[in-house]
């Protein structure tokens, strides 16, 4: 009899899809299954300090790698991670959550075993995952291999989390080694719907006298559906003025002259608003307007002159065409835009549409550090290849308006907006793209929620720069309501001391700064030692907020009570 098992099949299939590590926390129901991970030739285990952090790490990995895997134990482990899985669902990140469960023999006897509710019912937690996963399966001896393949295909193709309950005895059961790969994704576009879309889009684009009258606003779905290169080709065919929403920041090359900035509705810079809202024809690609992404729903998009490309539906004005998949629709538009470009008289404009990144040497060294100075210096510090993670709050909205260098990846979570997400996500993104420097920007309140994962970052010897924005509590909440209320206070921490206590040794250098000059020195030192972790506790005034965040909170004050 072969020693090949169901657990082996699962790990092999994950490896086939590009997963080279599984994040999680071990538990007795999953321990034997984890042996098949640690002994696998290409997949490794990355243990985290708790399951929530492991879920955030898997989410970060999945954003850059295209799919990720998380393994927890039944009940207590999976429920600790459920917030991370819900966030991955909201933000369209493919994470496979593998749950080690009690053996089917114990389940059949309805035993009140540990990590259950004691009622002999083992399906409670699967039910809790129904609305936050695209596919689920509780494996049995008869269907394990088929169900693993089905769930993994759904996760891959629909870019959403999936959930696999693997009883301990099923994991160890013999299985046939797969002889063929999983079927490739299928483009479900209807040719007649595509032809109708192309013809209708052509008629609207003919109303534009040149590509300078056509603009593109790009959103998150372009990235999640793997169409970033297709979008780049569409933009270059003009070249077209273009912008992204904050949720899709770094989707396009922000150093390009035709980049118009980050569009956030009424909170956008005037030049960005004009480029998007006044375009004769606007191509909206993969955009979902959320409250924090749109300046509290203050976007001004005129439907009659808009080509709107969604994941599986493409629209021109009031006419909709489906099914038309987003990558296919964008590819079809490229030729239409090239036709418009042929009508241009003279060379393409070369002047930048978006404001340049502020210079980093405009303030004296002894200037007290504030939000403006902090993000100006950090923006100037970034280099091509960096992965920037900005936690929800002052960090995200402080960096969002700044133009990024070519080749920088920006990660945030503005829809689910679970503070503390980015510290464990740093672990995931840096392991997904080895060799790229992680730059974490996180508030002190958010960092306290997931700080223990710094120990894993140090253990894995991941080079990173971590800027903890010390503004004495929940400043983003103070800006919304209760600036002097005690519920927005936190206990201050000595972050350099904490970093050293987590076992980094010579690998970590940490400092506390409160002037522009001290921040410059710390960042220059980080540049000089790219192999280590640099932690900077950046002290800024408690009530200082970035201008974009201030604009959003002003719009929030005008909105109806929630």
Image: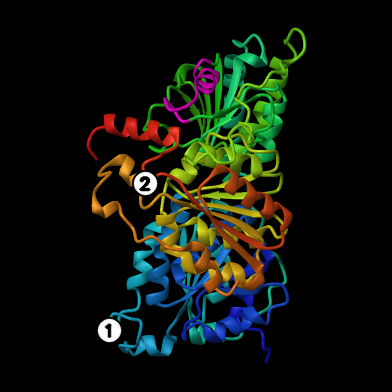
**Secondary structure found at label 1:** loop
Could you tell which of marks 1 and 2 lies nearer the N-terminus?
Answer: 1
Question: Where the N terminus falls, by quadrant?
Answer: bottom right
> Within 10 Å of the Cα at label 2, are there few (<14), some (14-19), or many (20+) other Cα atoms?
many
Q: Is residue 408 visible?
A: yes
274 in magenta: yes
Coordinates of residue 48 in the picture (x, y in percent) = 52, 72
Quadrant in the rendering for residue 81:
bottom left
Q: Nearer the viewer, mark 1 or mark 2?
A: 2
Q: Nearer the viewer, residue 332 or 231?
A: 231
Dot 1: within a 10 Å radius of its alpha carbon, few (fewer than 14), some, or many (20 or more) residues? few
The residue at the point 38 percent across, 70 percent down is 79
Against 400, is 353 above or below?
above
Indicate whether 289 appears above or below 56: above
Asked which secondary structure carries label 2, the reply is helix
Quickly name the residue at label 1: 118
The outermost residue toward the front is 366
Residue sitting farthest toward the bottom: 1
**Residue 475 located left or right of residue 431:** left
Q: Residue 475, labelled with which disc? A: 2
Q: Is residue 49 magenta?
A: no
| Image mark for residue 520 | none
Give the spatial CA distance, label 1 vs label 2. Answer: 43 Å
Q: Residue at x 24, y 33 (%)?
A: 560
Q: What segment is highlighted magenta in the picture?
A: 264-278
Nearer the observer, 330 or 191: 330
**Which percent across, then down, holds residue 466?**
57, 56
Say if residue 67 shows up in the picture: no
Q: Position of residue 315 (x, y in %)?
A: 51, 27
Residue 431 at x, y percent in the picture: 65, 63
Q: Is residue 296 left or right of residue 301?
A: left
Q: Residue at x 33, y 31 (%)?
A: 554
């Amino acid at each position: 009899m072969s020693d090949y098992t169901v657990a082996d099949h699962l790990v092999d299939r994950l490896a086939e899809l590009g997963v080279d590590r599984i994040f999680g926390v071990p538990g007795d129901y999953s321990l034997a299954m984890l042996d098949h991970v640690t002994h696998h030739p290409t997949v490794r285990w990355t243990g985290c300090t708790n399951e929530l952090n492991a879920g955030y790490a898997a989410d970060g990995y999945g954003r850059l790698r295209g799919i990720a895997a998380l393994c927890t134990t039944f009940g207590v482990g999976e429920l600790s991670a459920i917030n991370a899985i819900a966030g991955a669902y909201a933000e369209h990140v493919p994470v496979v959550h593998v749950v080690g469960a009690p053996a089917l023999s114990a389940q059949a006897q309805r035993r009140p075993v540990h990590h259950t509710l004691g009622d002999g019912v083992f399906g409670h937690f699967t039910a809790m995952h129904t609305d936050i996963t695209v596919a689920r399966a509780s494996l049995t001896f008869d269907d394990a291999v088929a169900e693993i393949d089905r769930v993994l295909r759904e996760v891959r193709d629909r870019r959403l989390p999936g959930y696999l309950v693997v009883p301990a005895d099923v994991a160890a059961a013999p299985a046939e080694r797969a002889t063929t790969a999983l079927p490739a994704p299928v483009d479900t576009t209807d040719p007649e719907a595509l032809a109708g879309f192309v013809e209708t889009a052509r008629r609207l684009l003919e109303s534009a006298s040149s590509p300078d009258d056509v603009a593109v606003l790009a959103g998150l779905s372009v990235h999640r559906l793997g169409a970033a290169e297709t979008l780049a080709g569409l933009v270059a065919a003009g070249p077209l003025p273009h912008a992204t929403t904050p949720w899709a920041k770094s989707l396009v090359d922000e150093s390009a002259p035709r980049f118009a900035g980050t569009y956030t509705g009424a909170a956008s810079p005037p030049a960005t608003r004009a480029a998007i809202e006044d375009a004769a024809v606007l191509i909206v690609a993969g955009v979902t307007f959320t409250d924090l992404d749109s300046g509290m729903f203050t976007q001004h998009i005129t439907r009659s002159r808009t080509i709107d490309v969604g994941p599986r539906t493409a629209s021109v004005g009031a006419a909709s065409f489906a099914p038309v998949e987003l990558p296919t629709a964008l590819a079809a538009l490229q030729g239409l835009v090239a036709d418009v470009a042929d009508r241009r008289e003279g060379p393409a404009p070369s002047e930048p549409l978006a404001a340049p990144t502020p210079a980093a040497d405009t303030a004296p060294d002894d200037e007290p550090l504030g939000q403006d100075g902090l993000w100006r210096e950090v923006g100037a510090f970034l280099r091509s290849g960096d992965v920037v993670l900005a936690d929800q709050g002052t960090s995200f909205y402080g960096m969002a308006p700044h133009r990024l260098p070519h080749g920088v990846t920006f990660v945030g979570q503005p829809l689910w907006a679970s503070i503390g997400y980015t510290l464990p996500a740093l672990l995931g993104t840096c392991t997904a793209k080895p060799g790229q420097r992680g730059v974490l920007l996180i508030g002190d309140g958010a960092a306290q929620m997931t700080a223990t994962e710094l120990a894993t970052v140090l253990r894995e010897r991941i080079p990173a720069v971590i800027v903890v924005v010390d503004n004495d509590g929940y400043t983003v909440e103070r800006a919304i309501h209760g600036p002097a209320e005690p519920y927005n206070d936190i206990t201050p921490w000595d972050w350099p001391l904490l970093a050293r206590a987590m076992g980094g040794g010579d690998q970590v250098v940490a400092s506390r700064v409160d002037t522009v000059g001290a921040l410059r020195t710390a960042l220059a030192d980080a540049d000089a030692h790219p192999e280590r972790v640099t932690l900077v506790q950046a002290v800024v005034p408690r009530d200082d907020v970035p201008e974009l965040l201030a604009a959003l909170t002003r719009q929030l004050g005008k909105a109806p009570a929630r």
